[in-house]
Amino acid sequence: MRSTNCHRDEGGFTLIELVVSSALTVLALGMVVSVLASAQTTEGRVAGRSANNDQARLAVSEIDRQVRSANLLYDPSTGSPPNMSLLVYTQYNSVERCVQWEIQNENLVTRSWSSTWQTDGLVSSWRVVATNVVNEIVSPVVPAFSLDTSQPDYGQRILNIDLVINDSSNPASAAELQASVTGRNTEYGYPATVCASVPPG
């Protein structure tokens, strides 16, 4: 019987080879994690911007319905602050009420009250409709609400809405949402003072 001698190479990796391969593995994992973190941050930013833009679109849609049902549309340039506040006397949903829109601390907010709020106390609290509205802090300042007087046939019934949305300190990432809304062609004889008495707050 013949015996065979099997010689196995029992040599392994040297310490230098292990250190180099470990360093390369850590470097590759670091690059993958960095790419994933960057992608996640970008996705979060895009989702946030999209949510802000959706909020602004919903606000414009709500304003559109109220202005189309409006009995009176007050000139936003007389608001406080000028062109950052909108006041409408509307009968939207068959309920007559004064509706106010305003940009406060980068939020577009709204509230409503009855024309007899001083006796019946019907005044809603402010409600945030859209966030990161930066009309007041961009340079130059962008009027959020203004009446279009370039078409005299429409009187003072065309409302221009221009909302600047930005959830970042980078001005280049701002989005602008513009719309024009036309109110009814009659004011039904309502006195201009019907919403002149604005509740405090």
Image: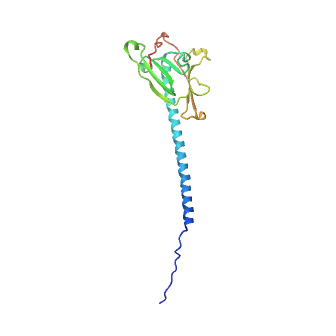
What residue is shown at x 54% (from left), y 60% (from top)?
Answer: 22
What residue is shown at x 60% (from left), y 33% (from top)?
Answer: 171
Rendered location of residue 129, percent (x, y) = 47, 28
Rendered location of residue 156, percent (x, y) = 56, 15
What residue is shown at x 57% (from left), y 27% (from top)?
Answer: 137
Rendered location of residue 116, percent (x, y) = 41, 12
| Count of marks overlaid on the render | 0
Rendered location of residue 75, percent (x, y) = 54, 16
Does 84 appear above or below 51? above
The furthest residue to the left: 120
Q: Quadrant of residue 149?
A: top right
What residue is shown at x 56% (from left), y 17% (from top)?
Answer: 77
The furthest residue to the bottom: 1
Q: Quadrant of residue 165?
A: top right
Pick whichever, 10 or 88, lies toward us. Answer: 10
Query: Which color scheme is applied?
Result: rainbow
